[in-house]
Amino acid sequence: MSSPDDRKPMGNPLEKKIDVIIAAVQNFGLNFIQKIGELKHAVSVLSDQVEKMNNALITVKGLEPKMNEITSMKHDLMTELHYLQSQIKATSFKNSDVVKMKCEDDSSGYLEGLKTFQQNLRSYTSSSSLSRDLEEIKKKIYELTGGHRVLFEIGETIKQLTKLESLSESDIQNLDEKITFWLNKLKN
């Protein structure tokens, strides 16, 4: 005798179509569930990567103030280094072992020359004549003081002035402010 499972269903065509439709729906459901699982995994991986990127961005933003501080310190050190180099060069020319940092000469001839230069700033039309006169004042200050920190700043300003093709009102204004600053430093 044959068992009921061994028998081939003779079923009608409607049952066959229903079986085919059910198999198709089951396949679709399984594929759909599998694709959702893959999508969930991909979203999980991407969210982990976004979280890592966010943490890295926070770390980089946290370094910005430190980088600004380091840049500022580097600028200060470079300014000091240039100043020391100019002092060493000036000292070697004078054959002097002492570098004066403060004006000890009570004759304020160089101060008056710098004040007069400041008052006549508006009369200059070319940067070359302005830088040439400022160079002369720098030499007088050097001769009378033997060396001062302001000399380096004046030298840097002269370099900037020689690069200019023409003088603008803002250039004159900036130079006027610098001269006031220099006068205050030379008085102290």
Image (tube, rainbow, N blue to C red):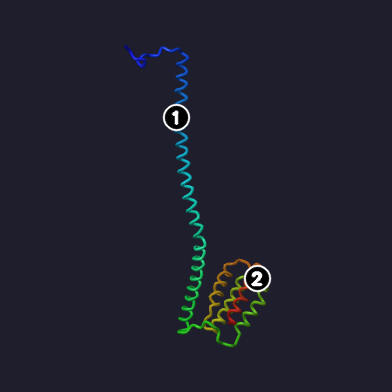
Q: Rounded to the nearest whole Å, what is the CA distance between mark 1 and mark 2?
A: 79 Å
The front one of 60 and 135 is 60
Q: Secondary structure at mark 1?
A: helix
Q: Position of residue 20 (x, y in %)?
A: 45, 20
Q: Which is nearer the N-term, disc 1 or disc 2?
A: 1
Q: Which quadrant holds the C terminus?
A: bottom right
The front one of 74 and 66 is 66
Left or right, 150 with reference to 31: right
Q: Residues within 10 Å of mark 2 (few under 14, many from 20)?
A: few
**Residue lying at 55% horizontally and 86% vertically, measured from the top left:** 104
* Amino acid type shown at disc 2: Gln
The front one of 162 and 22 is 22
Residue 38 in the image: above or below residue 84: above
Q: Position of residue 17 (x, y in %)?
A: 47, 17
Q: Which quadrant holds the N terminus?
A: top left
**Residue lying at 47% horizontally and 31% vertically, measured from the top left:** 32
Left or right, 71 with reference to 176: left
**Residue lying at 54% horizontally and 81% vertically, measured from the top left:** 142
Give the quadrant of residue 116.
bottom right
Residue to which mark 1 is pinned:
30
Q: Secondary structure at mark 2?
A: helix
Q: Residues within 10 Å of mark 1 (few under 14, many from 20)?
A: few
Residue to which mark 2 is pinned:
173
Q: Position of residue 12 (x, y in %)?
A: 45, 12
Residue 70 in the image: above or below residue 87: above
The front one of 67 and 110 is 67
